[in-house]
Amino acid sequence: MVIPALNSASTIEASVTSALEQDYLGDLEVVVAVGPSTDDTKGLLLGIADERLKVVANPDGGTSAGLNAAIYASSGEVIVRCDAHARLPSGYVQRAVEILEETGAANVGGIQAAEGERPVQRAVAMAQTTPMGVGDARYRTGGKAGPVDTVYLGVFRRKALDDAGLFDERQVRNQDYELNWRIREDGGTVWFDPSLRVAYSPRSSFRSLWRQYFEYGMWKRVMLRRHPDSLRWRQLVPPLFVLALIASLVLLATPWRLVGAVVPAIYVAALLITAFTLGVIRRDWAAVLVPIALPTMHIAWGLGFMVGREWLQVDARD
């Protein structure tokens, strides 16, 4: 099990504990690659007394570099990716290995079950699990088991990883999708199974959510330059939406102002309907913040895709 960690003091203990407490019938090791953190991430890890835990350095600090460093330091035939913000259910590894054997897939994974404690986190979690927020991405919204383009985290056959060349360390974001694309190009199958659910703590402020999604959009464009055939319809929606908003603003200053108001009006109505529906279904008042979370995600992703400059993002490491 491999975990990249950087400035993760608030979540790393829960993540590593969930990894070490797996109800798995075989041998298990947990390798955490720690970047140059400014908090006590490394100290907390060194305080965990378990011989199955190995802590290695990740001087680069990037997620892909950390994952590769942890993989190099590991010895298992199956590589389970975990995240410093994630908490694995106790039967996750056992079930994932069973699915690998049953399907013959190169990589299997399931649902990113976003959960929050603070109001903003809960609103973001709701936004990240609704089709208006993420389209048809099964790893966020669920669906039937079967082949997909990508999954959350992933449980890999080591040979498939080696054959694909591990994670691309040039990708600050979107490294999972990019790797899964190469695995599928090599003839491997990426398999989604909804029984594999992993709890995930989303961003707790709209500012950090904006940065996260701006980088998502920017690094998606970088990936598409390398793999143009990997484009999916849902990835075009945010930039097209931003262009539509810009066009609407221009029209509002002309005699065609009523036409310019159509897209914003429809969007606001969709936001309010989505928020109301989520509030009723989830019975959580934090749904009132969903109309802030969704535009933050959409506009940040779209602008990142359109104007983001990856060479400026030297510190985009969380």
Image (cartoon, rainbow, N blue to C red):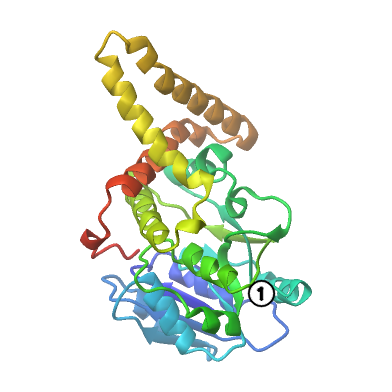
Q: For the point 52% across and 78% down, which residue is it?
A: 164
- Which quarter of the picture shows residue 76? bottom right
* Count of all numbered marks drawn on residues in the image: 1
Q: Quadrant of the N terminus?
A: bottom right
Q: What's the residue at 64%, 74% (across, down)? A: 106
Quadrant placement of the C terminus: bottom left
View extreme (right): residue: 102
**Callout 1 secondary element:** helix
Identity of the amino acid at label 1?
A: Val
Q: Position of residue 79 (x, y in %)?
A: 57, 80
User: Left of 33 or right of it: where is 207?
Assistant: left
Residue 17, quarter of the rendered image: bottom right
Figure check: 117 above or below 84: above
| 256 relative position to 102: left or right | left
For disc 1, the neighbor class at 10 Å (few under 14, some 14 to 19, many from 20) is many
| Res 274 seen here | yes
Q: Which residue lies furthest to the left in this view?
A: 312
Front-most of 250 and 145? 250
Q: In this view, does 89 lie to the left or right of 221?
A: right
Q: Residue most toward the front?
A: 229
Task: Residue under label 1, please give it.
Answer: 93
Residue at 65 percent across and 89 percent down: it is 27
Q: In this view, does 82 lie above or below 286?
A: below
> Toward the viewer: 61 or 41?
61
Q: Residue 276's spot in the image, x, y percent?
A: 56, 27
Q: Does residue 49 appear anywhere in the picture?
A: no
Residue 301 picture location, percent across and down: 38, 46
Q: Where is residue 46 in the image (x, y as percent from the top left)?
A: 40, 84
